[in-house]
């Protein structure tokens, strides 16, 4: 359970469920969407911990559940593959061939991150692709298939990259010590904070555009508050609390997305 990254897994699954309910899915259809997203997230989370276990051990991250246990790695690898295979029919069942394929591609981006791109300068790209494709998957599979608005896709992508940058910042020192790490290891702390703040602000601006398009003055004001809060977190909060603080503000942005998306 710990190796599946339960917080992000449940958050993304819940987001998929609520977005499906808001775009016209019946209860059963929304449940299948949630199940497809859940299996996809489980496969990504488990494979991430299995593939990162040697690096985690070298970096002294004893809190990681698979460090020091070859038997656990073998078990989780089997479960990751099974979850990935289950994601394919569930995605097609939830959103048809076209819509479901977008979700399969999103999960594929997560696996590509785990297998290779997490240690490169484009470590942010799979996050952007995977979360940008999530609303496409749900909208294309809705009872009246359509394309999600561009502002919604940009907001999803921006929040995902923000989360990646903030999360990777926590392991900056240990990643550099063992000679690995993605874009954050190249940028350093100050540049990473600026990049995360810009990406998060882009999400707030995208939400503001959606609020203007739907004539919601209240959400436009709240989006402005989120942008200011994000820059305050970027400038003032120390590394220990930076990720958690950013998650709180990003969660508020996600709530606004759910209010606007339908």
Image (cartoon, helix red, strand yellow):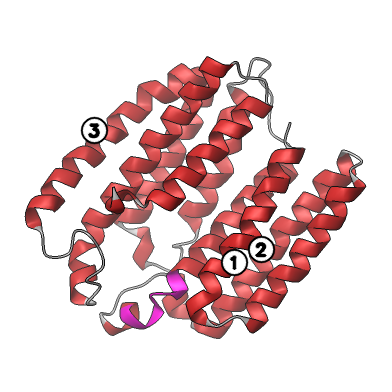
In primary-sequence order, the first of circles 1 and 2 is: 2
Query: Which residue in the structure is indicated by mark 1?
Result: 246
Q: Quadrant of residue 232?
A: bottom right
Q: Do tag 3 and tag 1 residues touch (Cβ < 8 Å)?
A: no
Check disc 3: other Cα within 10 Å, few if <14, some if 14-19, many if 20+.
some
The residue at 37%/54% (across/down) is 113
Q: Quadrant of the C terminus?
A: top right
Query: Which residue in the structure is indicated by mark 3?
Result: 82
Check disc 1: other Cα within 10 Å, few if <14, some if 14-19, many if 20+.
many
Q: Which residues are magenta?
A: 168-174
Q: Do tag 2 and tag 3 residues touch (Cβ < 8 Å)?
A: no
Check disc 2: other Cα within 10 Å, few if <14, some if 14-19, many if 20+.
many
Mark 2 lies on a secondary structure that is: helix
In primary-sequence order, the first of circles 2 and 3 is: 3
State whether the magenta stretch is mostly helix, strand or loop: helix
The residue at 34%/46% (across/down) is 44
């Amino acid at each position: 359970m710990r190796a599946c990254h339960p917080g992000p897994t449940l958050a993304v699954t819940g987001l998929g469920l609520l977005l499906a309910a808001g775009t016209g899915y019946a209860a059963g259809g929304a449940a299948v969407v949630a199940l497809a997203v859940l299996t996809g997230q489980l496969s990504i989370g488990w494979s991430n911990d299995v593939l990162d276990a040697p690096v985690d051990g070298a970096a002294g991250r004893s809190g990681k559940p698979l460090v020091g246990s070859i038997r656990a790695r073998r078990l989780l690898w089997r479960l990751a593959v099974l979850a990935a295979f289950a994601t394919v029919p569930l995605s097609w069942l939830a959103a048809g061939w076209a819509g479901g394929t977008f979700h399969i591609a999103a999960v594929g981006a997560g696996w590509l991150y785990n297998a290779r791109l997490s240690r490169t300068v484009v470590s942010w790209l799979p996050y952007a692709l995977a979360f940008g494709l999530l609303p496409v998957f749900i909208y294309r599979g809705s009872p009246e298939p359509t394309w999600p608005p561009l502002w919604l896709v940009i907001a999803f992508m921006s929040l995902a990259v923000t989360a990646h940058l903030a999360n990777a910042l926590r392991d900056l020192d240990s990643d550099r010590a063992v000679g690995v790490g993605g874009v954050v290891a190249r940028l350093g702390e100050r540049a990473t904070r600026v990049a995360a703040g810009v990406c998060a602000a882009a999400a707030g601006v995208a939400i503001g555009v959606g609020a203007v398009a739907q004539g919601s003055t209240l959400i436009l004001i709240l989006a402005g508050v989120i942008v200011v809060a994000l820059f305050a977190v970027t400038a003032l909060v120390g590394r220990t609390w930076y990720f958690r603080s950013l998650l709180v503000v990003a969660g508020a942005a996600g709530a606004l997305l759910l209010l606007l998306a339908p």
